[in-house]
Image (tube, coloured by chain):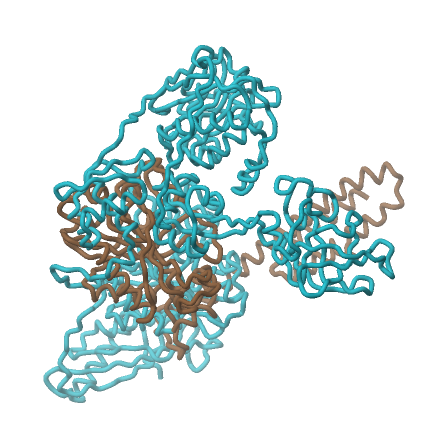
């Protein structure tokens, strides 16, 4: 009986070699391994054998069966690979033929782009110029020069993705302040957009990748009052003339005095609702007078130059402006969301 | 930081509403994130007196009570409680009441009898014997003393307090304490704050005779103070202390531990109490740990130390990890007879790094990391000893061990009044500044246009140096109120604002892409190493040079992307799966390559089209329209491109010989890897390269004075011949006239060999072009000669025949 088994194996393998397409393969598979197949038939006759014979043969028979199944699978993969290759060849096109234009519905810019432009354009009118810096930064620029030396406890305020002990994914656009202070002639007014990264698990109000816009004004005699006026003017440009802004004291290592900026609630207009926890105000960003250490660290004299700066989360502003309840939608890429911002 | 209102009132009179207080604190830089009632959500529960108890007609285990809840008419309450009798006063939850777990009570029928509410036990009220002795009786709570019927349960139990949850900024570690925050609260409320001074307990004997402390590393431990208490009576702390601890979320343990915890809350200074019998020779050594030295901490865990960590030891062994947690071997137990109270200062950076390395940032470590100071360390110790005496917890020994390398002198700084006014754009007189600083117990004197400020020991954030004027401006600004500073716009020179060219170019390109029907994506920069395999990138492909993150969310987000293709395809899969019906997307984003000190950053434009109406040529059409709009000319598409593109449907794109990027159908294998169920077409272009070929200012070209003639040619060419080859030959032919606007307008491949007279291996292509001269109208002869020259060249170069 074992010889018979071997014969079936030999025959099947020979036939397998000759097979040209999937249909033939399926047919052969049915003939050999199927319910009514040759191999199955043989195995079925084993019932007549003694127990010892059955055990010995059973093992061998299963080995043969396993081998055949594997060979069939291999062949099947090879055939479909071949078929795909042939199809790819058949599908050849002349890539130099002209493109075609279809009438399609308008596309749309991402809300981040829209908000970034609104803030930027409001500031251009106040004499600001665009500036940018790298997304992957030196620790020195992201922290140390900004008055955050290694092991400073305030580093814990921003959970950081590191590339190595000297290089990280910038946690804010502020390292561009150091780059600008070091390289540009003073005075200047800069608006600095860019992607930033923090180790925040994504949820409705956090995203590990987010977009920030830094404002930096360096001059001889700027003050908190100028900071207030500047911020209020772009808040009004983005949210409308009837939206108020206020500063309240806070702390950031790179500014002193530091403040948080609140705007009157965009949902209830300042009367108090669930979105603003009844306070009538919503926090949108941090700002302050640039810490003199930062100016000195960047090689400029804090006696001669004073600066103010802020960093606003474009995502946050977009969510408030458009009433987007989940920041993840901005990054997810669902066309039904993106197409709403034409 | 939790500040219970009653606790605040111990230090400061309070005559306003909690909400108004929160607003005042907010505008001084202390955000009250939440105001939590002491009894949490419990509401609508009142004292009532049971007037009568009747059996329930339908249930043996229920009873029907008539109660006086202080209203006009009595209420009927059905209860299963067995521990109440007529005349008892009990808490009753009436219609709309809320109990712990946000459990709401409404009138109901119980086995056919109306019940207006429910009697409450301690669990429903969320209280324990600590709040009301005897309330944990297993049944309904019964008041032990007389209360007016209808009184709110909060008033009856004296649990009517509220707790302010205050968010602190890292520059104010001094406010991480009841005393510190009350100091600010007093100023916010316009009240004078009297600093509490702990009474010094002299004690008897001198603890320095029996115990000693050696600090081997005074840099990491600038001050170590300690006192000893003997004849300890370890027992539960008094109810008032337990209640205070519970109000701020701490669990009472025993009198000694509770004392250190209460001092932590009051003074913000972490302390530790050692069982002195477990410290060999009663000698504490503060030293760096040996490499791999092991200590078991109070939580029973073994901590393996390294030599940069600070250890509290005795001459033989570690008894605690400095600033993080005490050792198990010297824990206070009920058998402890004598204790050494430690109140020390450790260097924040060192505690931060130790706690992080041990993955154990305890409450105590968190305080040291935020910063503690040496004067307060002694105050905390004094207070602890005062409490020991007050609680009769043991016999206080005289003397204090004080190993101090810290400067305890008073810091004086000087700030310019004019400069502070400049920073704030205010015009405050020096006297007013002195008054404002005085409101938070900072003493200053005005002299010759300067403020001489005596910095109190607790204000470690005020610097003597270049930051001083800014520090003082911050205090003045905050106390004066930012709201009182009128907004201005910058004075001085005006500036010419402008949008930089790269930003302007990006605007135009994005606007054009949107006009071409594409939706703008912002994909995350994190990708999986698998993505690079799914794209079948070769081993030497530069896109394998991805920057790897040290601390990613997971392996599947561990790399910074080197291509936009993956993100575009993930968006395709998402939109197809959700059947959104949208099939055109683009992204402008940076990719990074791991070479050089800082990775190389490159901006790319990626575009994807998919859906039944899209193919290679619709995507090509989109790109051509973009190029047309931004003036990128002389664009050529040449076979070739990355492995993730379909081998016979991909092209590299060049402008004036410079490669801009590539376009192609996505390879079937890649489609499968990204779970995309149908064909998709993708292009990635180098943003900088596109920008190099943009025309931003177009120059006018004079209109032709003489008419052009259009000619069409139908050709039989080799099946493999590309339209571009034919166009190139037509353009290069020696026609002696201008040959312009050459376009292919028809391609016909025979379905069967010989079909429509086209031989096997050939196809038909039809082209159109115009002929023109600048200085005259072309004659028929010239036209004929030009066409002939073109045909000759086509025959010679491409073996192309005019189709019959």
Residue placed at 76% from the left, 59% from the top? B66
Q: Is residue A298 above or below residue B74?
A: above
* Residue A31 spot, x, y in % from top left: 74, 57
Q: How many marks?
A: 0
> Judging from the image, what is the letter of the chain drawn in brown?
A
- Which quadrant of the figure contains the N terminus of chain B? top left
Residue B691 lies, in percent from the top left, at 24, 62
Q: Position of residue B662 (x, y in %)?
A: 35, 61
Position of B428 compared to A53: left or right?
A: left
Residue at image point 51% right, 15% down? B279
At which x and y percent is residue B101?
Answer: 63, 53
Q: Quadrant of the C terminus of chain B?
A: bottom left
Left or right: where B92 falls relative to B287: right
Work out whether residue B607 can be spotted.
Answer: no
Decide: is B85 above or below B376: below
Q: Nearer the viewer, residue B325 or A110?
A: B325
Please name whichever residue, A193 or A47, is drawn nearer the observer in this view of the structure. Answer: A193
Colour of chain B in the image: cyan
């Amino acid at each position: 009986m074992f010889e018979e088994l071997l014969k079936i194996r030999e025959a099947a393998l020979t036939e397998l070699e000759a097979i040209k397409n999937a249909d033939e393969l399926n047919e052969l598979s049915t003939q050999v391994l199927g319910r009514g197949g040759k191999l199955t038939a043989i195995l079925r006759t084993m019932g007549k054998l003694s127990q010892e014979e059955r055990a010995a043969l059973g093992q061998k028979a299963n080995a043969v069966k396993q081998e055949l199944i594997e060979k069939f699978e291999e062949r099947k993969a090879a055939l479909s690979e071949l078929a795909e290759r042939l199809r790819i060849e058949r599908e050849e096109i002349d890539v130099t033929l002209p493109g075609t234009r279809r009438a399609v519905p308008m596309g749309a810019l991402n809300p981040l782009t829209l908000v970034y432009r609104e803030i930027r354009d409001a500031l251009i009118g106040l004499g600001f110029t665009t500036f940018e810096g790298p997304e992957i930064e030196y620790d020195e620029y992201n922290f140390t020069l900004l008055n955050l030396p290694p092991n400073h406890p305030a580093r814990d305020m921003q959970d950081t993705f590191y590339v190595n002990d000297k290089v990280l994914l910038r946690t804010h656009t502020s390292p561009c302040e150091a780059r600008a202070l070091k390289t540009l002639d003073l005075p200047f007014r800069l608006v600095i957009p860019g992607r930033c990264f923090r180790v925040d698990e994504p949820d409705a109000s956090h995203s590990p990748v987010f977009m920030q816009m830094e404002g930096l004004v360096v001059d001889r005699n700027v003050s908190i009052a100028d900071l207030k006026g500047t911020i209020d003017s772009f808040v009004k440009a983005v949210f409308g003339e009837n939206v108020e802004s206020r500063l309240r004291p806070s702390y950031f290592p790179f500014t002193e005095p530091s403040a948080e900026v609140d705007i009157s609630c965009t949902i209830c207009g300042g009367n108090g609702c669930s979105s603003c926890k009844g306070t009538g105000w919503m926090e949108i960003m941090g700002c302050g007078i640039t810490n003199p250490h930062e100016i000195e660290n960047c090689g400029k004299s804090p006696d001669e130059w004073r600066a103010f700066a802020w960093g606003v989360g474009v995502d946050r502003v977009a969510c408030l402006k458009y009433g987007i309840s989940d920041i993840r939608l901005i990054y997810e890429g669902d066309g039904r969301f993106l197409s709403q911002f034409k | 930081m939790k500040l219970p209102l009653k606790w605040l009132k111990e230090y400061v009179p309070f005559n306003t509403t909690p909400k108004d207080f929160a607003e005042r604190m907010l505008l001084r830089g202390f955000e009250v994130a939440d105001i939590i009632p002491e009894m949490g959500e419990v509401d609508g529960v009142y004292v009532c007196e049971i007037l009568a108890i009747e059996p329930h007609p339908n249930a043996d285990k229920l009873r029907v009570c008539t109660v006086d809840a202080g209203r006009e008419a009595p209420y009927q309450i059905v209860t299963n409680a067995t521990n109440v009798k007529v005349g008892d006063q009990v808490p009753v939850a009436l219609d709309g009441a809320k109990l712990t777990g946000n459990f709401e009570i409404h009138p109901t029928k119980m086995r056919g009898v109306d019940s207006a509410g429910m009697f409450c036990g301690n669990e429903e009220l969320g209280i324990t014997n600590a709040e009301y002795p005897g309330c944990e009786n297993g049944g309904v709570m019964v008041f032990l003393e007389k209360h007016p019927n209808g009184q709110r349960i909060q008033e009856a139990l004296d649990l009517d307090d509220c707790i302010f949850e205050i968010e602190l900024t890292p520059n104010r570690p001094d406010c991480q304490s009841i005393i510190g925050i009350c100091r600010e609260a007093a100023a916010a409320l316009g009240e004078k704050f009297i600093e509490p001074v702990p009474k010094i307990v002299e004690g008897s004997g001198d603890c320095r005779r029996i115990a000693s402390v050696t600090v081997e590393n005074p840099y990491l431990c600038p001050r170590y103070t300690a006192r000893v208490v003997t004849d300890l009576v370890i027992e539960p702390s008094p109810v008032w202390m337990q209640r205070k601890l519970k109000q701020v979320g701490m669990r009472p343990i025993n009198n000694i531990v509770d004392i250190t915890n209460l001092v932590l809350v009051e003074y913000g200074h972490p302390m530790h109490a050692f069982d002195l019998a477990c410290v060999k020779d009663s000698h504490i050594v503060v030293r760096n740990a040996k490499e791999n030295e092991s200590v078991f901490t109070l939580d029973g865990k073994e901590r393996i130390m390294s030599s940069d960590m600070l250890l509290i030891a005795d001459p033989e062994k570690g008894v605690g990890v400095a600033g993080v947690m005490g050792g198990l071997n010297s824990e206070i137990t009920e058998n402890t007879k004598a204790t050494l109270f430690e109140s020390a200062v450790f260097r924040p950076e060192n505690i931060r790094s130790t706690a992080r390395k041990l993955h154990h940032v305890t409450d105590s470590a968190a305080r040291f990391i935020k910063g503690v100071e040496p004067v307060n360390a002694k105050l905390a110790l004094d207070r602890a000893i005062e409490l020991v005496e007050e609680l009769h917890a043991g016999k206080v020994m005289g003397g204090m061990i004080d190993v101090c390398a810290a400067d305890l002198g008073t810091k004086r700084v000087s700030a310019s009044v004019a400069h502070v006014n400049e920073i704030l754009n205010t015009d405050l007189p020096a006297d007013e500044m002195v008054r404002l600083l005085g409101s938070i117990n900072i003493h200053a004197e005005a002299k010759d246009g300067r403020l001489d400020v005596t910095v109190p020991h607790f204000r470690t954030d005020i610097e003597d140096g270049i930051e001083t004027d800014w520090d003082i401006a911050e205090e003045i600004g905050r106390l004066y109120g930012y709201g009182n500073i009128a907004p201005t716009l910058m004075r001085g020179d005006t500036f010419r604002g402008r949008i930089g060219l790269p930003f302007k170019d990006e605007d135009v390109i994005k606007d054009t892409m949107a006009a071409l029907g594409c939706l703008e994506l912002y994909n995350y920069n994190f990708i999986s190493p698998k993505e690079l395999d799914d794209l079948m990138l070769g081993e030497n492909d530069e896109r394998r040079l991805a920057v790897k993150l040290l601390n990613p969310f997971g392996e599947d987000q561990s790399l910074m992307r080197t291509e936009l293709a993956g993100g575009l395809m993930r968006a395709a899969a998402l939109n197809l799966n959700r059947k959104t019906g949208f099939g055109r997307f683009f992204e402008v984003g940076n990719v990074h390559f791991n070479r050089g000190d800082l990775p190389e950053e490159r901006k790319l434009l990626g575009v994807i089209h998919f859906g039944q109406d899209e193919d290679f040529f619709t995507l090509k059409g989109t790109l051509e329209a973009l190029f047309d709009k931004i003036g990128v000319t002389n664009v050529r598409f040449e076979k070739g491109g990355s492995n993730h593109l379909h081998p016979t449907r991909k092209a590299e794109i060049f402008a004036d010989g410079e490669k801009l990027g590539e376009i192609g159908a996505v390879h079937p294998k890649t489609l499968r890897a990204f779970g995309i169920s149908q064909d998709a077409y993708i292009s990635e272009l180098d943003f900088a390269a596109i920008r190099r070929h943009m025309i931003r200012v177009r120059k006018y070209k004079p209109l032709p004075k003489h008419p052009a003639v259009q000619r069409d040619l139908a050709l039989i060419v080799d099946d493999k011949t590309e339209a571009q080859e034919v166009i190139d030959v037509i353009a290069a032919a020696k026609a002696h006239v201008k040959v312009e606007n050459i376009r292919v307008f028809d391609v016909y491949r025979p379905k069967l060999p010989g079909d429509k007279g086209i031989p096997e291996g050939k196809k038909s292509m039809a082209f159109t072009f115009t002929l023109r001269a600048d200085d005259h109208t072309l004659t028929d002869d010239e036209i004929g000669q030009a066409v002939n020259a073109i045909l000759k060249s086509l025959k010679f170069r491409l073996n192309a025949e005019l189709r019959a």
